[in-house]
Amino acid sequence: MEGLSLDLWPGEMVGLVGESGSGKSVTALSVLRLIEPPGRIVGGSALFEGGDLLALREADMAAVRGRRIAMVFQNPRAALNPVMPVGEQIARVAAHHLALSRSAARARALELLEQVQVPEPARRARAYAHELSGGMCQRVTIALALAGGPALLLADEPTTGLDVTIQAAILDLLRDLQHAVGLTVVLVTHDLGLVAETCDRIAVMHAGHLVEVGTVRQVFAAPAHPYTAGLLGAIPRIDRAVTMTSVPGDLPSLLDPPAGCRFAGRCDRVEDACLSADPPWIPLADGHRVFCRLPGVPAPRG
């Protein structure tokens, strides 16, 4: 990723969207400094609670992970220890981060399972991951993420592989928790429908760059970047007939990215200047901004 700049505000939910390979998950992992070799962070800063996460010693960063910033991963069953009851896993995390006694940690685990709406929490706490459904495993991983009392939750495709009704329940749960405990949530997803229903703001990524940031209302009503417009054009509607479109071409290689705007090879507005220099960030209105030399709003669909 390059030139990625995004502010997060307490108690909001931000949708980080884009195609697979655009850099969404890498962005979330970079915040926690969990990039695996040969990948590495070579510059920039990640400012959080008065300090720069990228400048912390590893021991200090380890104290942030799980305690102040937590992450929910795509595959909930793989994120759980298969040979330990889920309640014990939550209790151990709570004991580690909050310095609780064994009995207090177990009580905290039951409290969290109840908070994420796991039925019969005392019985479910004794279950193993393979004994739970995918949706139930995801609720458990959310409880694990909340065990340390974080201020920021990074949710990386938390509904992948779940059926539609379970997806809705998990997203309702995240929204409820956001309001109940004042969480800031970053929802990493490729599903713009989920973002429209649950998020306050949206940040659109393409080829390692943010290309548009604004409130959900601003971006959905008036997408200013051609990539955003293309993503929205690919969404079917049930309220009226629309002509669906697709974004042409493929993502450019991030190992050898092209000069200039990385969307130029897929853009129908491209000019010579787009091919030689990065576009500027252009402020539009009330926090809505776009990374494009020629921002514009397409004609309404339908």
Image: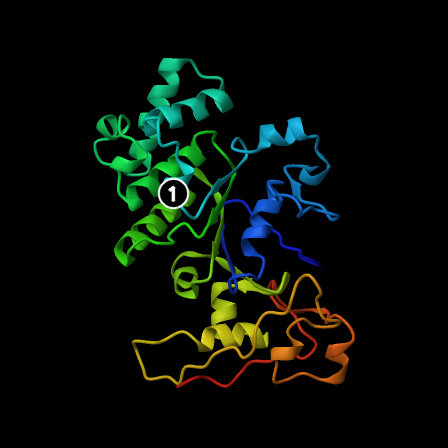
Looking at the image, which residue is at 65% across and 44% down?
Answer: 37
Relative side of 242 to 69, left or right: left
Tell me residue 183's x, y (percent).
47, 42
Looking at the image, which residue is at 50% across and 24% down?
Answer: 97
Q: Secondary structure at mark 1?
A: helix
Vertical placement of 284 versus 65: above or below?
A: below
Q: Which residue is mark 1?
A: 76
Tell me residue 6's x, y (percent).
63, 54
Vertical placement of 91 versus 237: above or below?
A: above
From where the camera sits, is residue 130 visible?
yes
Tell me residue 68's x, y (percent).
55, 34
Q: Nearer the viewer, residue 280 or 275?
A: 275
From where the camera sits, is residue 295 visible?
no
Relative side of 294 to 16, left or right: right
Q: Nearer the viewer, residue 215 or 270?
A: 270
Looking at the image, which residue is at 48% across and 64% down?
Answer: 216
Vertical placement of 121 versus 222: above or below?
A: above
Q: Nearer the viewer, residue 7 or 206?
A: 206
Tell me residue 45's x, y (percent).
71, 46
Badge 1 amino acid:
Pro
